[in-house]
Image (spheres, rainbow, N blue to C red):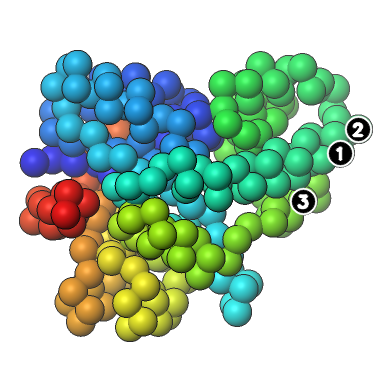
Amino acid sequence: MKADLHNHSFLSDGILSVEDIVSYSKKIGLDCISITDHDTLAGVLPAYTFGKKIGIAVIPGVEISTIDYENNRSVHMLCYFPKNMFKLQGFLNKILINRENAKREMAKMLMREYPITMEHIERYSSKSQSMYETHIMQPMADLGYTNIVIGEFYKGLLSKKGKYYVQIKYPSVYEALDMIKEVGGIAIMAHPGEFNSIELLEKLSKKGLIQGAEYNHPRNSEEVKKQIKEIANRYDLIMTGGTDFHGNYSKSPHPLGSFTCPEDQLERLIKLGNS
Protein backbone atom coordinates (compact mmCIF):
# COMPACT_ATOMS: atom_id res chain seq x y z
CA MET A 1 0.00 0.00 0.00
CA LYS A 2 1.20 3.49 -0.88
CA ALA A 3 0.33 5.99 1.85
CA ASP A 4 0.98 9.68 2.55
CA LEU A 5 0.32 10.19 6.27
CA HIS A 6 0.96 13.92 6.76
CA ASN A 7 -1.32 16.44 5.04
CA HIS A 8 -3.01 19.74 5.88
CA SER A 9 -6.30 21.05 4.55
CA PHE A 10 -7.86 24.52 4.77
CA LEU A 11 -9.27 23.45 8.14
CA SER A 12 -5.85 24.50 9.45
CA ASP A 13 -3.16 26.14 7.29
CA GLY A 14 -3.42 24.23 4.01
CA ILE A 15 -5.06 25.52 0.84
CA LEU A 16 -7.20 22.58 -0.33
CA SER A 17 -10.37 21.12 1.15
CA VAL A 18 -10.37 17.69 2.77
CA GLU A 19 -12.35 16.32 -0.17
CA ASP A 20 -9.82 17.73 -2.66
CA ILE A 21 -6.90 16.10 -0.84
CA VAL A 22 -8.65 12.73 -0.63
CA SER A 23 -9.78 12.94 -4.26
CA TYR A 24 -6.32 13.87 -5.60
CA SER A 25 -4.74 11.17 -3.42
CA LYS A 26 -6.89 8.62 -5.21
CA LYS A 27 -6.10 10.18 -8.59
CA ILE A 28 -2.32 9.93 -8.14
CA GLY A 29 -2.52 6.29 -7.04
CA LEU A 30 -2.29 6.45 -3.26
CA ASP A 31 -3.99 3.61 -1.40
CA CYS A 32 -4.12 5.38 1.95
CA ILE A 33 -4.18 8.97 3.18
CA SER A 34 -4.27 10.81 6.51
CA ILE A 35 -5.43 14.38 7.08
CA THR A 36 -3.31 15.65 9.98
CA ASP A 37 -4.46 19.23 10.42
CA HIS A 38 -2.84 21.26 13.18
CA ASP A 39 -4.65 20.78 16.49
CA THR A 40 -8.01 19.84 14.99
CA LEU A 41 -9.78 16.59 14.16
CA ALA A 42 -12.44 18.44 12.13
CA GLY A 43 -11.32 16.80 8.88
CA VAL A 44 -11.27 13.20 10.13
CA LEU A 45 -14.93 12.28 9.60
CA PRO A 46 -15.28 14.08 6.23
CA ALA A 47 -12.08 12.41 4.99
CA TYR A 48 -13.19 8.96 6.15
CA THR A 49 -16.67 9.37 4.68
CA PHE A 50 -15.44 10.64 1.30
CA GLY A 51 -12.62 8.10 1.22
CA LYS A 52 -15.13 5.29 1.74
CA LYS A 53 -17.19 6.67 -1.14
CA ILE A 54 -14.35 6.80 -3.69
CA GLY A 55 -12.35 3.81 -2.46
CA ILE A 56 -9.29 5.05 -0.60
CA ALA A 57 -8.34 4.14 2.99
CA VAL A 58 -8.18 7.00 5.52
CA ILE A 59 -6.24 6.86 8.78
CA PRO A 60 -7.56 9.30 11.41
CA GLY A 61 -4.86 11.70 12.53
CA VAL A 62 -3.91 15.11 13.89
CA GLU A 63 -0.67 17.08 14.34
CA ILE A 64 -0.38 18.48 17.85
CA SER A 65 1.68 21.61 18.58
CA THR A 66 3.75 21.31 21.76
CA ILE A 67 6.86 22.71 23.41
CA ASP A 68 9.86 20.95 24.93
CA TYR A 69 10.19 23.46 27.77
CA GLU A 70 13.51 22.02 28.96
CA ASN A 71 15.15 23.15 25.72
CA ASN A 72 12.58 25.79 24.70
CA ARG A 73 11.97 24.09 21.34
CA SER A 74 8.86 23.35 19.34
CA VAL A 75 7.88 19.70 19.06
CA HIS A 76 5.09 18.45 16.80
CA MET A 77 3.41 15.17 17.67
CA LEU A 78 1.35 13.22 15.18
CA CYS A 79 -1.46 11.26 16.81
CA TYR A 80 -3.01 8.46 14.75
CA PHE A 81 -6.07 6.32 15.54
CA PRO A 82 -7.28 8.27 18.63
CA LYS A 83 -10.15 6.28 20.14
CA ASN A 84 -11.72 9.18 22.06
CA MET A 85 -11.69 12.04 19.59
CA PHE A 86 -14.07 14.22 21.62
CA LYS A 87 -11.75 14.22 24.63
CA LEU A 88 -8.70 14.88 22.46
CA GLN A 89 -10.41 17.78 20.68
CA GLY A 90 -11.32 19.29 24.05
CA PHE A 91 -7.59 19.34 24.87
CA LEU A 92 -6.73 20.77 21.43
CA ASN A 93 -9.34 23.54 21.60
CA LYS A 94 -7.18 25.46 24.09
CA ILE A 95 -4.37 25.54 21.52
CA LEU A 96 -6.74 26.75 18.79
CA ILE A 97 -7.98 29.59 21.00
CA ASN A 98 -4.45 30.61 22.02
CA ARG A 99 -3.38 30.59 18.36
CA GLU A 100 -6.39 32.63 17.24
CA ASN A 101 -5.70 35.30 19.88
CA ALA A 102 -1.99 35.51 19.03
CA LYS A 103 -2.57 35.71 15.25
CA ARG A 104 -5.17 38.44 15.66
CA GLU A 105 -2.66 40.46 17.68
CA MET A 106 -0.08 39.96 14.93
CA ALA A 107 -2.61 41.00 12.29
CA LYS A 108 -3.49 44.18 14.18
CA MET A 109 0.18 45.21 14.36
CA LEU A 110 0.66 44.46 10.67
CA MET A 111 -2.40 46.56 9.79
CA ARG A 112 -0.72 49.62 11.29
CA GLU A 113 1.93 49.40 8.55
CA TYR A 114 -0.02 47.91 5.62
CA PRO A 115 -3.55 48.68 4.34
CA ILE A 116 -5.01 45.19 4.83
CA THR A 117 -8.20 44.66 6.83
CA MET A 118 -9.40 42.01 9.27
CA GLU A 119 -12.36 41.37 6.97
CA HIS A 120 -9.93 40.50 4.16
CA ILE A 121 -7.96 38.16 6.44
CA GLU A 122 -11.15 36.48 7.62
CA ARG A 123 -12.12 35.63 4.04
CA TYR A 124 -9.33 33.06 4.27
CA SER A 125 -9.38 32.16 7.97
CA SER A 126 -13.16 31.60 8.14
CA LYS A 127 -12.79 28.10 6.65
CA SER A 128 -10.16 27.17 9.22
CA GLN A 129 -10.54 26.15 12.85
CA SER A 130 -8.13 28.96 13.80
CA MET A 131 -6.23 31.86 12.24
CA TYR A 132 -2.77 31.19 10.78
CA GLU A 133 0.04 33.24 9.25
CA THR A 134 -1.06 32.06 5.80
CA HIS A 135 -4.43 33.77 6.25
CA ILE A 136 -2.72 37.03 7.17
CA MET A 137 -0.16 36.86 4.37
CA GLN A 138 -2.61 35.93 1.60
CA PRO A 139 -4.20 39.44 1.61
CA MET A 140 -0.66 40.88 1.39
CA ALA A 141 -0.19 38.82 -1.76
CA ASP A 142 -3.62 39.86 -3.04
CA LEU A 143 -2.53 43.50 -2.73
CA GLY A 144 0.76 42.92 -4.55
CA TYR A 145 3.22 43.20 -1.67
CA THR A 146 4.47 39.69 -2.41
CA ASN A 147 3.75 36.83 -4.80
CA ILE A 148 4.86 34.11 -2.35
CA VAL A 149 2.69 33.67 0.73
CA ILE A 150 5.29 31.85 2.84
CA GLY A 151 8.63 33.32 1.76
CA GLU A 152 11.23 35.90 2.77
CA PHE A 153 8.65 38.69 3.13
CA TYR A 154 6.64 36.55 5.54
CA LYS A 155 9.83 35.64 7.41
CA GLY A 156 10.59 39.27 8.22
CA LEU A 157 7.06 39.99 9.39
CA LEU A 158 5.37 37.01 11.02
CA SER A 159 7.89 34.19 11.54
CA LYS A 160 9.38 33.58 14.98
CA LYS A 161 12.09 36.09 14.08
CA GLY A 162 9.62 38.50 12.48
CA LYS A 163 8.94 41.96 13.90
CA TYR A 164 5.25 41.26 14.52
CA TYR A 165 5.53 37.77 15.97
CA VAL A 166 3.48 36.97 19.09
CA GLN A 167 4.30 33.82 21.06
CA ILE A 168 1.56 31.20 21.35
CA LYS A 169 1.02 29.29 24.60
CA TYR A 170 1.39 25.57 23.81
CA PRO A 171 1.14 22.52 26.09
CA SER A 172 4.33 20.71 27.04
CA VAL A 173 5.27 17.68 24.99
CA TYR A 174 4.64 15.53 28.08
CA GLU A 175 1.12 16.91 28.56
CA ALA A 176 0.35 16.11 24.92
CA LEU A 177 1.79 12.59 25.21
CA ASP A 178 -0.26 11.95 28.36
CA MET A 179 -3.39 13.01 26.46
CA ILE A 180 -2.55 10.83 23.44
CA LYS A 181 -2.17 7.85 25.76
CA GLU A 182 -5.39 8.72 27.58
CA VAL A 183 -7.42 8.77 24.33
CA GLY A 184 -5.85 5.55 23.08
CA GLY A 185 -3.90 7.14 20.22
CA ILE A 186 -0.54 6.30 18.66
CA ALA A 187 2.14 8.96 19.29
CA ILE A 188 4.58 9.62 16.43
CA MET A 189 7.12 12.44 16.60
CA ALA A 190 6.73 14.57 13.46
CA HIS A 191 9.80 15.58 11.39
CA PRO A 192 12.46 15.23 14.14
CA GLY A 193 14.99 16.96 11.89
CA GLU A 194 13.07 20.23 11.67
CA PHE A 195 13.41 21.20 15.33
CA ASN A 196 16.66 19.34 16.12
CA SER A 197 14.70 16.82 18.18
CA ILE A 198 16.84 13.69 17.79
CA GLU A 199 18.03 13.85 21.41
CA LEU A 200 14.44 14.24 22.60
CA LEU A 201 13.34 11.38 20.32
CA GLU A 202 15.86 9.12 22.03
CA LYS A 203 14.76 10.29 25.48
CA LEU A 204 11.03 9.76 24.83
CA SER A 205 11.68 6.40 23.16
CA LYS A 206 13.74 5.18 26.10
CA LYS A 207 10.88 6.09 28.46
CA GLY A 208 8.37 4.30 26.23
CA LEU A 209 6.32 7.47 25.74
CA ILE A 210 6.09 7.34 21.95
CA GLN A 211 5.42 4.59 19.44
CA GLY A 212 7.19 5.99 16.42
CA ALA A 213 8.89 8.77 14.46
CA GLU A 214 8.27 10.37 11.08
CA TYR A 215 11.12 9.05 8.96
CA ASN A 216 10.30 10.00 5.36
CA HIS A 217 9.74 13.78 5.39
CA PRO A 218 11.01 16.65 3.20
CA ARG A 219 12.79 18.33 6.11
CA ASN A 220 14.61 15.25 7.39
CA SER A 221 18.15 15.16 5.99
CA GLU A 222 19.80 11.85 5.10
CA GLU A 223 21.86 12.10 8.28
CA VAL A 224 18.73 12.66 10.38
CA LYS A 225 16.99 9.73 8.67
CA LYS A 226 19.96 7.54 9.55
CA GLN A 227 19.70 8.64 13.20
CA ILE A 228 15.93 8.04 13.26
CA LYS A 229 16.43 4.55 11.85
CA GLU A 230 19.05 3.71 14.49
CA ILE A 231 16.75 4.87 17.32
CA ALA A 232 13.75 3.10 15.75
CA ASN A 233 15.68 -0.16 15.58
CA ARG A 234 16.89 0.25 19.13
CA TYR A 235 13.43 0.85 20.61
CA ASP A 236 11.26 -0.94 18.04
CA LEU A 237 9.57 2.26 16.83
CA ILE A 238 7.27 2.58 13.81
CA MET A 239 8.78 4.80 11.08
CA THR A 240 6.10 6.71 9.18
CA GLY A 241 6.27 9.04 6.19
CA GLY A 242 4.38 11.98 4.75
CA THR A 243 4.72 15.03 2.52
CA ASP A 244 3.52 17.59 5.10
CA PHE A 245 1.39 18.85 2.23
CA HIS A 246 0.01 22.43 2.41
CA GLY A 247 -0.38 23.19 -1.32
CA ASN A 248 1.23 26.53 -2.17
CA TYR A 249 1.15 27.52 1.51
CA SER A 250 4.58 25.91 1.88
CA LYS A 251 8.12 27.23 2.12
CA SER A 252 9.12 24.82 -0.65
CA PRO A 253 6.78 22.96 -3.04
CA HIS A 254 6.20 19.25 -2.62
CA PRO A 255 3.19 17.74 -4.40
CA LEU A 256 0.83 15.41 -2.60
CA GLY A 257 2.31 11.92 -2.39
CA SER A 258 5.95 13.06 -2.71
CA PHE A 259 6.88 11.41 0.59
CA THR A 260 5.23 8.17 1.62
CA CYS A 261 5.23 5.71 4.50
CA PRO A 262 7.34 2.54 4.13
CA GLU A 263 4.85 -0.27 3.41
CA ASP A 264 5.93 -2.59 6.20
CA GLN A 265 5.72 0.30 8.68
CA LEU A 266 2.23 1.21 7.46
CA GLU A 267 1.13 -2.34 8.19
CA ARG A 268 2.53 -2.06 11.70
CA LEU A 269 0.75 1.26 12.28
CA ILE A 270 -2.60 -0.07 11.08
CA LYS A 271 -2.25 -3.25 13.12
CA LEU A 272 -1.47 -1.24 16.27
CA GLY A 273 -4.29 1.22 15.52
CA ASN A 274 -6.82 -1.57 15.20
CA SER A 275 -5.68 -3.44 18.30
Q: Of the residues under marks 3 and 1, which one precedes in the sequence?
A: 1
Residue 187: x and y, percent?
35, 60
The residue that appears at 21% across and 63% down in the rendered structure is 238
- Checking the image for residue 109, the label placed there is 1
The reply to whether the C-beta atoms of the residues labelled 2 and 1 are less than 8 Å apart is: yes
The residue that appears at 71% across and 23% down in the rendered structure is 121
Mark 1 nearby-residue class (10 Å; few <14, some 14–19, many ≥20): some
Which residue is at the front of the view, 139 or 34?
34
Which residue is at the front of the view, 193 or 129?
129
Which three-letter amino acid code belongs to the residue tagged 2? Arg
Residue 128: x and y, percent?
57, 27
Residue at numbered disc 3? 166
> Distance of mark 2 from mark 1, alpha carbons?
5 Å
> Distance of mark 3 from mark 1, alpha carbons?
10 Å
Residue 183: x and y, percent?
39, 54
- SS state under label 2: loop
> For residue 54, which quarter of the picture?
top left
Q: Of the residues under marks 2 and 3, which one precedes in the sequence?
A: 2
Which residue is at the front of the view, 43 or 264?
43
Image: 120 above or below 62: above
- SS state under label 3: loop
> For residue 258, which quarter of the picture?
top left
- SS state under label 1: helix
Which three-letter amino acid code belongs to the residue tagged 3? Val
Give the side of residue 114 with respect to residue 250, left or right.
Answer: right
